[in-house]
Image (cartoon, rainbow, N blue to C red):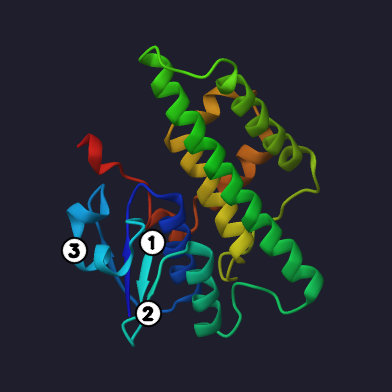
Amino acid sequence: MILFSQRHSPFARKVEVALLETGFAKIEVRHLADHVRQGDEAAYEENPLNTAPLLILDDGRGVFDSAEICFYINEFSRGALIPKDSGEREAVLTLQHLATGLCELGADLRWEVQQNALGISVPGLRDDLISQLGAAYDILEHGPPMARPPGDEVADIGTIALATALDWLTFRGLDRYLPPHPNLDWWVDGFRERPSMAATEYEDLSEL
């Protein structure tokens, strides 16, 4: 199997971190350039959406949704990423969904800020996006204390998704629009020390 990934994508990094956390070494990882079509034409042929991550299965089929790829990794690793208990499973998958929403809000905010700099923007949209992003941060900041999984314990997919999402928002400088969230910062700083995170740091090839 082959995983096509990108260094600047929070969704691709989530998958890479999941692979490293589970120790699943049967998937070859290929990093693409900033744009999928620039990196490997085989990836584009298997994914008409022209996005990464993309997993090519042994039978040649392509899977190009990060959550779905992580379901495959969970199956390959005998359920290491997603708890079997229904309550715990729901909590983990809900956290992954929240992390996806954070990335989508961040992408919209980044685009709106860029458009604003060009004098092209939707009135009030920037502030609305910042408000929505801040509300999500506040929920995480004031919710139940989040534990840091021990270094020898596999992190679940919700935790991985949240860590890679928050680190991406920092990478893109989008958290500068928000007030401090010390509890959340403490948690993310600790998670960044995991080998799986250190090995997959963000890099924007479009600016090199």
Amino acid on which the number 1 mark rests in the picture: Pro
At 44% from the left edge and 69% from the top edge, which residue is drawn? 20
Q: Residue at x 21, y 68 (%)?
A: 42
Q: Tell me if residue 106 comes above or below residue 74 in the rendering.
A: above
Mark 1 lies on a secondary structure that is loop
> Label for residue 53?
1
Q: Nearer the viewer, residue 200 or 59?
A: 59
Q: Nearer the viewer, residue 79 or 68?
A: 68
**Quarter where residue 148 is shown:** bottom right
> Is residue 102 visible to the viewer in this orientation of the structure?
yes
Graded by Cα atoms within 10 Å as few (under 14), some (14 to 19) or many (20 or more), the crowding at tag 2 reads few
Disc 3 packing (10 Å; few <14; some 14–19; many ≥20): few
SS of the residue at dot 3? helix
Q: Position of residue 69 (x, y in %)?
A: 47, 70
User: As displayed, is residue 65 above or below residue 115?
Assistant: below
Give the number of the mark in front: 3 or 1: 3
**Quadrant of the snapshot with the N terminus:** bottom left
Badge 2 marks a residue whose secondary structure is loop
In the displayed structure image, the side of residue 122 where residue 146 appears, left or right: right
22 vs 135: above or below: below
Mark 1: give few (<14), some (14-19) or many (20+) Cα within 10 Å.
Answer: many
Q: Earlier in the sequence, mark 3 or mark 2?
A: 2
On residue 25, which mark appears?
2
Q: Earlier in the sequence, mark 3 or mark 1?
A: 3
The image's mark for residue 135 is none
In percent of width and height, residue 74 lies at 55, 77
| Spatial separation of the CA atoms under disc 2 and disc 1 | 17 Å
Quarter of the figure with the C terminus: top left
Inter-mark Cα distance, 3 to 2: 24 Å
* Tally of marks: 3
